[in-house]
Amino acid sequence: MDSKIFKTLEYQKILNKLSHYAQTATGQQTALRLQPSDDLEHIKKMLKGTDEAYAADRLKGVPSFNGVVDITPAVKRARIGGTLNPQELLGIRTTVQAARRIQVYVASLHEENPVETLLFWSEQLSEQRSLENSIKGCIDENAEVLDSASTELSQIRRELRSGEVRIREKLDSMIRSSTVSKMLQDQLITIRGDRFVIPVKAEYRSYFGGIVHDQSGSGATLFIEPESIVAMNNKLRETRLREEREIEVILQKLTALVAEQADMLLYDVDILGNLDFIFAKARLAREMKATLPLMNDRGYLKLKKGRHPLIPLEQVVPIDVELGNSYTSIIVTGPNTGGKTVTLKTIGLLSLMAMSGLFVPVEDESQLCVFDAIYADIGDEQSIEQNLSTFSSHMTNIISILKNMTPKSLVLLDEVGAGTDPAEGSALAVSILEHMHAMGCRMVATTHYSELKAYAYERKGIINASMEFDVATLSPTYRLLVGVPGRSNAFAIAERLGLSNRILDYARGEVTEEDQRVEHMIASLEQNRLTAEQEREKAEQLRREMEALRSRHQTELDKLESQRDRMLEKAEDEARVLVDKARSEAEKIISDLRKLAQEEGASVKEHKLIAARKELDEAEPKQRKKNTVKRAATRTRSIMAGDEVTVHSLNKKGHVVELSGSKEAVVQLGIMKMKVSLDDLELLQPAQTPAPRVQKPVTGVKRTRDDNVRNELDLRGANVEEALIEVDRFMDEAFLANLGQVHIIHGKGTGVLRTGIQEYLRKHKHVKSYRIGNYNEGGTGVTVAELE
């Protein structure tokens, strides 16, 4: 693209603003060298990177590139054998550190919000931890070589400090002497040329001997190195030379490490500069309140509230422009200083910015096109040196445009055909515009010629537009009105300024009937436009009110639904707490009953069982009564002694030993007998014969063999707590059935279930012994228990 267009549209000013947001020298150079692209896919990739950086800036802020310096000259010098100084090595270290910090930032950002473009660049940064540590171990933050850089340097610097202390002590004792102190201008020790000296009055020069290194401006003071410390200063000088040689060796070693990684370091500098440049684009977009444009290559351009980026936000007037769909050319008319030229520059500059991967100051859903070139003839480019008139200058530019333009070009023409005879100028303008329009390019042209209004009105694919002018205030509004040609407004302005009606009437009579008809048509169109705009504003106001009403209703609905959800959640939580409490208390009561049974064997004190039963009844949820009534209603007959029943509160099966009154029964549950409410019992198997009435609770149970009782229990898949409850019930049944041996299948697994069961069997009073099953019995997955 011709660089001349950049100057015409002030594109370089945008790049200058962009470079100010870059934090590194490489990023600034990249910004200043930015050029528009005509490759749609490449532009989309650039815009994607800008979009990701814009989102990152909004979420986490722009990362700091502090520490990144332009190490390119230093690295190149290291590569050809030069020795780097401490400051250059420190710059390499801080740049490597910053690269790692940027990598961490982008990786963290990508986890929260995918940023593929930024991640692609950051992952190409090399890992230079070894080089960084080597430099860090030798160079401090002030670019000074550390004592610890080498053993030899550490020893040399100890000698230096020791030598300086001895010299100072020697001089200090000298200047404190009463004899010497009166010969000194000041009682202090100073340095001249790396050698320690004292300020001596000129008249006492011969007393000290030694070497004079300097004198004051007046000559009254001589800075003398006394003869007694000359040898000490010489030795100190030799030590400093050794220090310099050792530092040189250290710097050469570090430079060699840099040279080994030279290519990677140079590439890292470019990557960091590119990342800095991408984030600079994001910061520029935020400053301009710009948005991501939609890009296409089919010649379609649509700006919604487009703003010129170089005009302050509080002053700029947005424009709406659509080009390339129903029409490919726009003819803009209107008075001078009405904003026609700014409109041309806005269209051209926003196109250049979008093609450079920059956000543009437009509203969302705006579209911009990829042009192969943008051409412009804007402003008075009269050349005195070339002795060209205004018209000649414009024609030279237009001829160049006609030679180079293609159907995929954007052409911007300001005051086409101006600078010559109006009749010839308008005819030439029509001819030029017709040729460009026939070529198929996208074109926006401004003019004062009324003939071009009629041309645009009659020609398909070309539309009139104008810059709005407020006759009441005699000032432009800078608004672009597409579809309405501009009026001259000369008579209206003259009338408001006080020109007599007789002169105005005479002037109107000189205007041809056709011109008057055109003016009346334009006035009618303008009135219709104003009316339509007022109606649109009313409709827009109504829409906003309806939106506000709908939003308020939606808010109220959401509030009611939220309150309903909270109430339901609260009710569920209360019910859950109630159930958990009842379950916890029931488990405690069952546990207490088991302890009673183990402590007192088959004989349990009646008053203890009654008290425990009372606690269980109190812990039972209130809803249980309804279910109990239903169960009682479904019984086929009353419960009798000898019936097999289920005790719902304990979830256990047992046999009715006797009835105790009309509401309770004594139930045998394993080795225990207890009184249970008849409402808590469910009949399972009626007795075959009436059971004899038992006079008193017995303390023992006769062991008889029951063929229906199993001699094995399968607990695979159960947890320890559930398994122990089943084992307890199973052992009671086996003991009552007079079984001598039982098998408990717990599986192999992790061994937790087997350990819990065997620990329980070890304490059970009816278990004589237990062992792991034999090979044919299931091995370690089975425990065999021998009963007494």
Image (cartoon, rainbow, N blue to C red):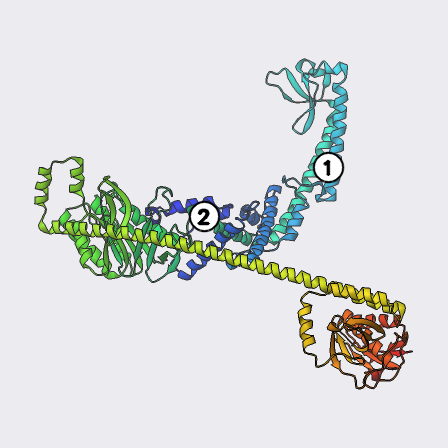
Give the secondary structure at mark 2.
helix
At 86% from the left and 69% from the top, the residue drawn is: 597
Residue 644's spot in the image, x, y percent? 78, 80
Asked where in the image residue 650 lies, by quadrant, the reply is: bottom right
On screen, residue 533 above or below 189: below
Looking at the rendering, in which quadrant would you find the C terminus? Answer: bottom right
Residue 494's spot in the image, x, y percent? 16, 38
Which amino acid, mark 1?
Arg
On screen, residue 502 above or below 551: above
Residue 352's spot in the image, x, y percent? 37, 52
Residue corresponding to mark 1: 157
Residue 153's spot in the image, x, y percent? 72, 41
User: Would residue 780 be visible to someone looking at this image?
Assistant: no
Give the secondary structure at mark 1.
helix
> Is disc 1 surrounded by few (<14), some (14 to 19) or many (20+) residues within 10 Å?
some
On screen, residue 776 above or below 491: below
N-term mark: 2 or 1: 1
> Is disc 2 surrounded by few (<14), some (14 to 19) or many (20+) residues within 10 Å?
some
| Front in this rendered view, residue 430 or 211 | 430
Residue 94: mark in rendering:
none
Which amino acid, mark 2?
Arg
At 57% from the left and 58% from the top, the residue drawn is: 567
As measured in the structure, the alpha-carbon distance from the residue carrying label 2 to the one carrying label 1 is: 54 Å
User: Would residue 692 be visible to someone looking at this image?
Assistant: yes
Residue 114 relative to residue 247: left or right: left
Looking at the rendering, in which quadrant would you find the N terminus? Answer: bottom left
Residue 418 relative to residue 187: left or right: left
Residue 200 relative to residue 726: left or right: left
Residue corresponding to mark 2: 286
At 36% from the left and 51% from the top, the residue drawn is: 350
Name the front one of labels 2 and 1.
2
